[in-house]
């Protein structure tokens, strides 16, 4: 793993920092209206939301400060062998340092450990760096969404075999 940051499981004390990251980064990309994850009830209680079976959430920490996060959980309304990569957001200081690639690997490893065969994600036009990471990580673009996430404003969908 590149030096300078740590990826670790979320703790209850991380909830405020993770919620603040989500509420800072999503509007930066125009993702603050209806149908986006910023409005999900779990935003304020990420530790508790991902303390469920077959779910994991990780944070990126640098100099003792949480600067990003991502997780996996079963895809709502999807096949039981499909997980969703969820709430992968990084503050500007976490970008371009290898944290995204390292986080992706950590999440995909966790998905395999939880017994998933495929990983799905939703995003939107304009999140170009994120989409480049997804493609580099082996995801392929889909024409339509899977499951029932409720994120009807997302317009890009990806799937990866695990």
Image (cartoon, rainbow, N blue to C red):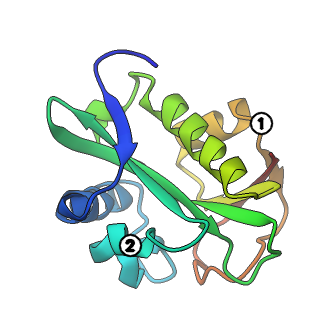
The answer to which image quadrant residue 41 occupies is bottom left
Label drawn at residue 138 = 1
In the image, taking residue 57 as reference, residue 106 lies left or right, namely right
Q: Badge 1, how many Cα within 10 Å: few under 14, some, many 20+?
A: few
* Distance between mark 2 and mark 1 Cα atoms: 26 Å
Residue under the point 30% across and 75% down: 45
| Visible residue check, residue 88 | no
Q: Position of residue 34 (x, y in %)?
A: 45, 83
In the rendered image, the residue lying farthest to the top is 3
Residue under the point 80% across and 45% down: 162
Residue under the point 48% across and 74% down: 36
Q: Is residue 36 above or below residue 8?
A: below
Q: Is residue 136 above or below residue 14?
A: above
Q: Position of residue 2 (x, y in %)?
A: 42, 16
Q: Secondary structure at mark 2?
A: helix
- Please identify, in this view, whether the residue under mark 2 or under mark 1 is nearer the observer: 1
Q: Position of residue 83 (x, y in %)?
A: 69, 63
Which badge, 2 or 1, is on the more N-terminal residue?
Answer: 2
Residue bearing mark 2: 38
Asked whether the residues under the numbered discs 2 and 1 touch, taking CB atoms below 8 Å apart as contact, a structural biologist would say no
Q: Position of residue 51 (x, y in %)?
A: 44, 70
The answer to which image quadrant residue 73 occupies is bottom right
Residue under the point 45% across and 56% down: 57
In the image, taking residue 109 as reference, residue 28 lies left or right, namely left
The front one of 87 and 79 is 79
The answer to which image quadrant residue 5 occupies is top left
């Amino acid at each position: 793993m590149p030096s300078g940051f740590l990826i670790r499981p979320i703790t209850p004390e991380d909830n405020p920092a993770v919620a603040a990251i989500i509420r800072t980064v999503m509007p930066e990309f125009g993702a603050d209206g209806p149908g986006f994850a910023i409005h999900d009830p779990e935003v304020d209680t990420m530790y508790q939301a991902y303390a469920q079976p077959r779910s994991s959430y990780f944070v990126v920490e640098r100099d003792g400060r949480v600067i990003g996060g991502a997780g996996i959980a079963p895809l709502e309304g999807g096949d039981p062998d499909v997980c969703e990569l969820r709430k992968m957001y990084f503050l500007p200081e976490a970008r371009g340092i290898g944290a995204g690639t390292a986080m992706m690997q950590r999440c995909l490893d966790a998905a395999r450990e939880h017994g998933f065969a495929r990983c799905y994600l939703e995003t939107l036009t304009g999140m170009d760096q994120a989409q480049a990471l997804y493609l580099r990580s082996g995801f392929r673009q889909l024409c339509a969404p899977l499951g029932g996430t409720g994120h009807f404003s997302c317009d890009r969908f990806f799937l990866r075999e695990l």
